[in-house]
Amino acid sequence: MDRFHELNAFIAVVEAGGFSAAARITGDSQSAVSKAIGALEKRLGVVLFNRSTRSVTLTDQGQRYYDRTKPLVDEMDEADGELTSSTFNASGLIRIAAASTFGRLHILPLIPDLLSQNPGLQVDLVLSDFVRGMVEDRIDLAVRVGAVNELDAIVRRVAGTPLVCVGSRRYFALRGIPKTPTDLVDHNCLVYSGMTKSANWSFTGPGGRFSVSVRGNLSSNSVETIRAGVLAGVGIGLFTKASLAGELRHPDVISVLDEFVSDVRDVSLIWPQRRYVPARVRRATDFFAAALPQHI
């Protein structure tokens, strides 16, 4: 059996999530797809899929094989496209990951323009405050706010967003406005964290950088929750300005300790490290690199 046919069948099963769905995508019969996968597994000497009556999932060997072969097939498709089209257009599915609040405020509003300018693209937007593993979750492009810890990633910084400490007028009417960061020990500070109700917030004063241990009665691994808590008058929060967006113009929200808050978080576009980056990923990266600084 043709190796390329086997490989196409394998990738179709992975991305469709099953043999029947892969058959519909490829136009082959389900038996032909099953035969191609069987031939591929026999040739490689490994089992690529865990099969059950309800689902088809990759084995560890299957995942590694997909991660290695999918970029190669993409590159071949791109090469074919360049030769068969006088005006090469980026096309295909691109999976984009971003933090929930930042993605809702700044990525989602830009998606219509991205798709309008690149009608061949399909976008799968993954919004989560949990940092996604790019290879494991098959992320093509990630938008990160803050430090990037992946040593095997390609990082393109496109903007910066300063931090701001805010609370509601209702809260400050009851508790008073902190004049210095050390006053925060007497305030209810809402902590962005899934593990603890305390945190160290960093500030800059005449003597340089220092941190203040803060705590409060509400913590969460969701920026959206901390935002809602601040708006409801529960306490004080420390955010990037990009995560607050219009809230800074809200009549009930004011910033405090501005002269002590100097940190800026990078906004970066990230690719997983690999030899070949598809044109659709490059096109989306260039789009966001130009559009995000104007939107934040």
Image (spheres, rainbow, N blue to C red):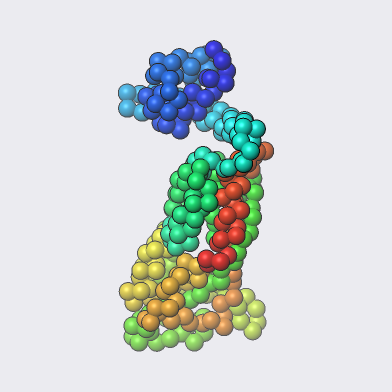
Taking the image as shown, residue 274 lies to the left or right of residue 188, namely: right
Q: Position of residue 201 (x, y in %)?
A: 52, 71
Q: Nearer the viewer, residue 82 or 155?
A: 82
Residue 69 in view (yes/no):
yes
**Residue at 57% across, 83% down:** 259
Residue lying at the far right of the rendered structure: 275
Above or below, comparing residue 213 to residue 176 in the picture: above
Taking the image as shown, residue 74 lies to the left or right of residue 28, namely: right
* Quadrant into which the N terminus falls: top right
Above or below, comparing residue 170 to residue 141 in the picture: below
Counting the numbered discs, the total is: 0
**Residue at 56% across, 61% down:** 291
Residue lying at the far front of the rendered structure: 86
Above or below, comparing residue 237 to residue 183 in the picture: above
Q: Nearer the viewer, residue 23 or 96?
A: 23
**Residue at 52% across, 19% down:** 6
Residue 265 in view (yes/no):
no
Q: Position of residue 51 (x, y in %)?
A: 39, 23
Q: Position of residue 155 (x, y in %)?
A: 64, 53
**Residue at 56% across, 71% down:** 162
Q: Nearer the viewer, residue 220 or 269?
A: 269
Taking the image as shown, residue 68 lies to the left or right of residue 138, namely: right
